[in-house]
Amino acid sequence: MSRSNELLQGTLDLLILKVLTPGPMHGLAIADRVRQLSEDVLRVNQSALYPALHRLEHQAWVKAEWGESENNRRAKFYSLTRAGHARLKTEEKSWERLSSAVHGVLRSV
Amino acid sequence: MRLLESIQRRLRSLRQRDTANEELSEELQFHLQTLADRHIARGLSPEQAQRAARAEFGDVNAATEAAYESRGTALVDDLMQDLRYGVRSLRRQPAFTLVTVLTLALGIGACTAIFSLVNAVMLRSLPYGDASRLVYLYMPNPRLKELPPEALGPSNADFFDIRQQAHSFSSMTMFDQKTMNLMMDGKAQRIGVAKVDASFFHTLETAPLMGRVFNEEDQQPGNDHAVILSYSLWQSLYGGAADVLHRTITLNDTRYSIAAVMPRDFGYPHHTDLPYGDGRIEATQVWVPYTLTAAQRADREQTSINAMARLKPGVTISEAQAEMSAIVARLEPLHKGFLFKGMTALVKPMNVQVLGQVRPLMSLLLGAVGFVLLIACGNAANLLLARAASRRHELGVRATLGARRGRLIRQMLTESLLLGAAAGAVGIALASLFIRVLLRLNPGDIPDMNAVALDGRALAFLVLVSIATSVAFGALPALTATRINVAEFLSSAGTRGLVADRRGLRKTLVTAQVALVVVLLTGAGLFVRSYLNVLSVDTGFSPATIGMNVSLTPAYDTAEKNDAFYADLLERVQARHGVYAAGLVNFLPLTNSESMNTLEVEGYANRKSQLVETRSITPNYLTAMQTPILRGRNFTPEEKSQSTSHVVMVNEVFAKRFLAGGDPIGRHLRYESNRPWSTVVGVVADTRNMNTEVAAAPQVYDAFFQTGNPPLRGAFLVVRSTMAKDVAIADLLATVRSMDPAVVVSDVHVMSELTEHANAPRRFQTTLLTVFSSTALFLAVVGVYGLLAYSVRQRTGEIGLRMALGSSRSGIMRLVLREGLSLLVAGLCLGIAGAVFFSRMLRGFLYGVPALDPVTFVAVPALLALATLAACLVPSMRAAATDPMVALRHE
């Protein structure tokens, strides 16, 4: 994994919340989905994924349930809570502010 | 609520920890397995697939631990684990634990005791509403150099003018002090009284427990037979009876009706409240109305009233001062007499007046006790460092097994907090013990000292200090001991390494302790030297002379009746068995009372307003006090009426200052220019009057029966007797009572008791500082000893090797001694530099000793060197006695 592909600190939470919007997903699927949506640019460091998921769960932004995976194994599925949706909105806003600011700086010079 | 929920969730997941762990591993298992499946689908073998999946995933262990911690249970969970582990490991080393806890408890206990003192004296608010808004009003005259600014208050007329004109004050009151005689159990007692105006209690914002305070009516002459009792007098006289109001009480042969009883903690003015109050009144027991006739209200002559005011909200001291200065400048021309020429105004906050004098002492004590605590912390840190070094194996193993550094630091800090908590618990007991000792040492000049107690605030302070010290002494060992290089640890087979740098750290700590001790000991040394100087002061009078105050009742209403009683008294006492000499004086030395007179000396360049201390004495006073007459003669019994030509005696300082050049005998002086000259007939040796530490001021002695003024506060009878003190005193009391049982005898003392009382504040300071610095010295010696003993144990192998290679036993001893003494030298150098710095601040506390006293600055290092040497001797002898064979096998 090249350095430029590493996720910016704090953006992992945002990506997880965003990816979970359509419906419940297990950890690996979240990692796959991030990679797929970013056209292979963003790769989730998988060992960092679970601490992040558990943190989000502890903060009650996602909830987890055990279910059956597509390959018929028992897997833990995460889904957004109401608080998680709200959180996603604020995170998205602050991300947009940040990125447009960075964008502005890059274009100005 | 969020916090509560969070705690609940943490506790729940704590209970479900095992299931949670299983679930986590199952979850990760699924992830890895699915990854592996994909690799197999791509054609890898199952083993290769597993490996690839793991590589792709990253560190599974780290992920597990991070996920575990992110659940938020880790903190609580680890804390419980750390506590259990800490208690177990501390119990395994009882000697270490005991020494550390006791050392810290000593520091914490002493700190808390001193804090309670500071709390009672400085921090607790006075029971007078917002006491910081109360101010005293003085009218000092800078031209009267002999009088301190606080000695002069406004005259009656000035007071009323100021009250009318000033806008800075919401309320103003005038009051005066006096003593009255009260018959209690058939004996006349003297009690402290305040004569107060109608706004006194209002200004102090204090309400009585029951009854009513004085009003303007009570201040009318003839209406003034109301009285307000203190709580303690109500209890002792009436047993706290509820129907005490409107009963009567007889004071000075006059009946007063009881109008109110004050609450328990009210005794204003106390003797510490007023700079020049009546020193005999510890706390006021009775308040009576201050009555003034119209003539008295208009009087601008000097009085002894105290004026106090409460600042209006929003008015600052400097604004009040500016307004007062303007008013007094307008009032000044209304006064007659040069005493008032150039008078000014001074607005002084009551807090500053009452606490100003004790503030330096309180800072000193807090500083000293803080040093002791620091030294105790140093010892604890050193013990922990030694312990950490011997635990490096355990810590190394834990680090190798994956414990992170933060986790190890937390573990060690938990242990030091445990030690701190235990020390705090022991400290409570020690603090209450220290407080009891403090109260016994009460020097009497510290306001509210009797209120010192281990109250809630002191306990909160103790808890804070315990926590702060735990972190202070635990942080360094925790940070250094956990800096573990796992590779190095493993390569050294888990037994060696990491010793040298920590010994360096411990040396630094011990050096710092030695330096602190030098500072403390130097301070104590300077205090002890000052105290010894004070003890050896020649007071100018005999310590064995008995003195007692004899106050007459208002029945003796003329100067003749007064003189007749006192003359009769002298005659009778002189005739008693064993009495060698008996005399009278109006103001006995060391009783906080003086009289000052203006003075004009013939043939001297007199200043317009020079003042001099005066005392009236009978001829045998000097004999009874054993104060020698240096030149000339004593008074004679013939000099007893105003008709005979006036004669005076002067003291040595007076003769030197005013009568220099030529024989002082036969020179003339007078108090007022319109009076005849008095002739100086004798020069008397100087005596200490104000205080043992204040050199004698110029002093004139008048003949007691020649002045024509009855003594203001009764006369002091002084007697030198060959009988035992108690017998002589009982006999004297009986003699006075046989003449008139209503006459009050009080302040019965042998002069040495007055000297001791005068020295009490210094004894208090010196005792405390000496105790603190001895404790510090002891702790530091323990510290040095501990370090060396440990170092010898660590170096057993090296010592064995040196001996095997031919080093002599004395060579080994030198080796260890050198290590110890190098600490001493470094500590001494730092400490002396510190002591030079701090001793300058002590200058105000010293008597007859320069701040850089050579004796102290030599004796302290010498003492410390001896103590350190003693501390080094045992470990170095033990090192020298090492058997090389055993030592080599020790590894």
Image: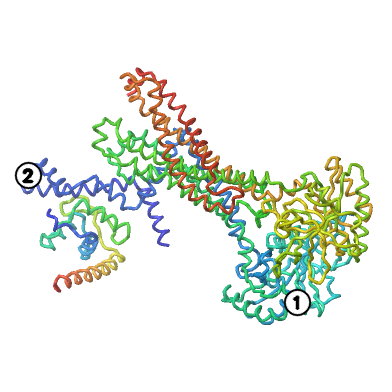
Residue B193 vs B94, above or below: the answer is: below
Q: Which amino acid does label 1 sit on?
A: Arg
Residue B555 horizontal/vertical position (percent): 92, 64
Residue A56 horizontal/vertical position (percent): 29, 58
Label 2: which residue?
B44
Residue B228 in the figure: left or right of residue B871: right
Residue B720 position by quadrant: top right
> Which of the two residues, B763 or B615, is positioned nearer the viewer here?
B615
The quarter of the rendered structure image containing the N terminus of chain B is bottom left
- How many residues crowd around disc 2 within 10 Å: few (fewer than 14), some, or many (20 or more)? some
- How many residues crowd around disc 1 within 10 Å: few (fewer than 14), some, or many (20 or more)? some
Q: Which of marks 2 and 1 is nearer the N terminus?
A: 2
- Residue shown at 35% from the left, 19% from the top: B884
The label on residue B300 is: 1
Residue B303 vs B849, above or below: the answer is: below
Do marks 2 and 1 share a subunit? yes
Residue A52 horizontal/vertical position (percent): 26, 56
Q: Which of marks 2 and 1 is in front?
A: 1
Residue B399 horizontal/vertical position (percent): 29, 39
Q: What residue type is labelled 2?
A: Leu
